[in-house]
Image: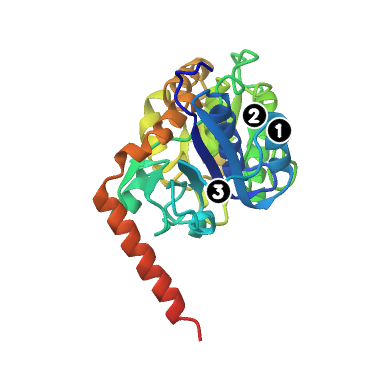
Amino acid sequence: MSALTETPKQVLVGTNHLIQVGGSELYTYDLLKELNRREDVEVEYFALEIGEMADRIEEEVGVTFMSKNHYDLMLVSHNTTVKALSHFKEGLITQVCHSATVELEQPSPYADYHVGITEEVCESLSKKGYPNDLVLNGIDVDQKCPMKEVNKDLKVVLSLCQSDDANELLANVCDKQGVEFVHFNKHKNPTFNIENKINEADLVVGIGRSVYDAMACGRPCIVFDNRNYNGNRADGYLEPELFEEFVQTNCSGRYHNLTFTEDDLMREFERFKPQDGEKLRQIAEEKLDVRTTTEQLLQTPNRINWKMRWRKSARAFFNSNLNSSSVV
């Protein structure tokens, strides 16, 4: 770096937990990896709970745990983490919200600015009075990439569903159609390099980041799962031209809000077109590349004006007094 180069921006990436493989953990991993690659940034991480994923970040990415007294920008997931980092009197906190309903993802009054990863989240933030920007999920599209062509005929279905009920439905459908069924559940058989498994499949079923990973690997997808917080929800087969609609609700099944039976899944299997995988890969490169989303996150301080700073101070003051008055 030359003497004329500006001093690197000091950035901290924070999250509630970095214990095992999961959506928020992989989001944090890819973000840290991209920030660490940039010459204009020096980055560290923070988490309230650490484990395997924190070890991976230190050993594989080369990013260390929080050690400084000042950061120019803190990119933080989860309101618990924002509160834990609110003692920094200097530096700005941008909270990245991944859900409109999950308690951990609710906006913190201690953040200077908020980002939603979907239009659904952004609308929720706006209704609650928090100025925000839309920045989609960032994927490392160099790591998550096509390694093997999709078969012309459907032969292998990979489920990334986190529900026994969903996997039972899928297994029955695959059995009836003579298709091989493989499944990975982060709670039971987690795998970090999921792109290797995705590339062995012709069709991937899941929601959220599982869909984005599959798109990046050039695989056709069905948006479906049956999770406790969401129930049996499906958007169905992801036609490439429908991505802009499905992504509004994080490819969660809440866009069409369908409930799937075996017959419904069988119908969606019949919509499989191998050429859709290439189209979805192109969309992932254009919309989900972590290089683009990271740059957008780094620009959020430019969105903060004096009114937002004043409102943040007022919210934090009110919240502190409210908490104090509740203590007996």
Q: Earlier in the sequence, mark 3 or mark 1?
A: 3
Residue 183 can be seen in this image: no
**Marks 3/1: CA distance?**
47 Å
Kind of residue at disc 2:
Val
Instruction: Give whichever of discs 3 and 2 has the lower sequence position.
Output: 3
59 over 232 or under it: above or below: above
Q: Earlier in the sequence, mark 2 or mark 1?
A: 2
Q: Give the residue displayed 57% in from the left and 56% down from the top.
A: 228
Q: Which residue is mark 1?
A: 182
* Closer mark to the observer between disc 3 and disc 1: 3
Q: Position of residue 142 (x, y in %)?
A: 58, 19
240 lies above or below 314: above
Give the side of residue 173 with respect to residue 261, left or right: right
Identity, as a three-letter code, of the amino acid under mark 3: Asn
Residue at the (62%, 50%) spot, across then down = 47
Q: Residue at x 54, y 42 (%)?
A: 13
- Which residue is labeled 2 in the image? 157
Q: Nearer the viewer, residue 21 or 52?
A: 52
